[in-house]
Amino acid sequence: MNKAKQMIKNARIIILLVFLVFAVVAIHPNPYAKGVAIRAVQPNSSAQIAGIESPQPSATPMSRERILSINNMPVENVADYFKYTFELKPNTSVYITTNKDTYILKTKPIIQVEYLDEYEDKEFIENVLVNKTYINETTQEEYTVEEEENRTVTKKERKTNTTIVGTEDLGMTIYEAPKNNIRRGLDLQGGSRVLLKPEKKISDTDADVILNNMKERLNVYGITDVIVRRAGDLSGNQFFVVEIAGAAESEATELVSRQGKFEAKIGNNTVFSGGEDIKYVCMSSECAGIDPMRGCWQIDRNQWACNFRFSITLSPQAAERQAELTKDLDVITEGSQEYLTEKLILFLDDSNVDELNIGADLKGRAVTDISISGSGTGATQQDAMVNTLESMKRLQTILVTGSLPVKLEIVKTDTISPILGEEFTKNAVIIGLAAVLAVALVVGIRYRKIKIVIPMILTPICEVTILLGIASLIGWNLDLAAIAGIIIVLGTGVDHCIIITDETLRGETEHIFDWKKRFKKAFFIIMGAYLTTFVAMLPLMFAGAGLLKGFAITTILGVSAGVFIARPAFAAAIEILLKE
């Protein structure tokens, strides 16, 4: 009891306990956390319209909003969420309760637009179908049914039939509710990692522009749980690493790797380009989405196509260029519509993606509000709609963010499924426990003293706890490389505790009763090993395009916490326990 009081009053042990408390607070363990956490909210989705926001990339896992129930049905896991949302009907209200608020969402229908073979034109029906002839009111010329149908088909309204075929997704990416603030890397939670290399050497300024541009693109695209960072190797090569948590995001991968050079041209002259020329890009349902005038249609038996449209606002300078380039163009008539002789041609990365007719009323006018359109295809109507909306979002994002200063080449991609990530996590925990038990067995056989074995086992565990607390506090992601670093920390911790214990016991054998002298000799060896490890880890922070950075940083932080916090406390405990 007297020795326990001495340990509690010891300054080095008090420091260790304080750090442990802060580490536990930072980790914030809660094994009873319920619901599913929101990873991201898609722009213009039902969830965003209802007021649900995407979490900030810097938000801790435990602070993220969690869905607890849908229409008063408890959501315990991801399977429950998809089960309830799959059963939702279009144009209905959905009550979603989270740990922060209750939201009322309005489900959006998926509409199929089917074009019929008939045309509706009152004058055409009366004059052609009834009288069997058509008389042009201007020229008084008479045409047959076939002749007039070929000549005036553009004047008639094509009849359509719209059908609701399903319900759009609510627009949220979710995952199992986290139980603590330890951030798991891609190896442990699944996701995609893309290693990009500039096609030529770039300056630090251009590198910062690329970094910010990619982050902005992913943010506009609706992806928040992502890491974008610069990296390099010992040969001086420059890289960018993009890590996207969760399932594979091929669209986002393409988005960050493309230069995103957007131009709208009349002839060979550029009217406007993505970035500074675009002041506003509409992403709301009122002015963006599947084009209601054209909708979706079946091309052949195995292919569907859909059209999208959204409005943008040009800068005054771009509007003036449009006025200057259209003032001398001629006007042509197609049916009842009048257009200019040249079209507005849209180029993305130097590829023609669409051609738009320019209305005659825009001739020589500096108009800032215009509409952009495009299309997408798919094997089914649902696939076509999804691909069309994805194409629209990519184009909107590039119009908002502009082009990258240099093209990026994909050097390497890694994709890990969430299921495999869960297996990695379980295996890592099992390996950690097995390592602790193995160490306990070996140390127990070696010393055969419970008052030595228990502190020797607890010390590395304290070091790892402090390390995980630091990782939670600074937002460091733990992956397989970082776990390897933790194992190194466990190994060096036990090794250093053995050095301290052996020097202490050797001092008793040699009748050296100066405890300071014993520990000074032990810590001389420990500091030498620490500095060697520290120096050895520094090159690994820059090797392999930064992919070994997690291993190096975890090892340095863990060994430093051990040498300066945990191991001095262990020495103090051993001194108190062994002193007669």
Image (tube, grey):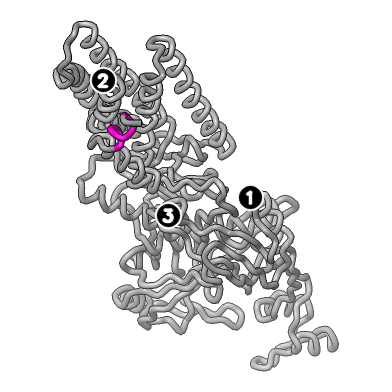
Q: How far apart, in angstroms, are the residues tagged by discs 1 and 3?
A: 27 Å
Secondary structure, magenta segment, majority class? helix
Which of the 4 image quarters holds residue 56? bottom left
Q: Residue at x 41, y 59 (%)?
A: 398
Percent across and percent down for residue 206 are: 24, 50
- Write down the residue under mark 3: 218
Label 2 to label 1, Cα distance in Å?
54 Å
Secondary element type, mark 3: helix
One can see residue 557 in this view: no
Residue 77 is tagged as 1
- As drawn, the residue found furthest toward the top would be 510
Give the Cα separation between the discs numbered 2 and 3: 61 Å
Bounds of the magenta segment:
3-8
Front-lying residue, 295 or 466 = 466
Horizontal side, residue 238 vs residue 442: left or right: left
Camera-near label (2 vs 3) is: 2
Place of residue 316 in the rendered image (x, y in percent of width and height, measured from the top left): 31, 78
Residue topped by disc 2: 579
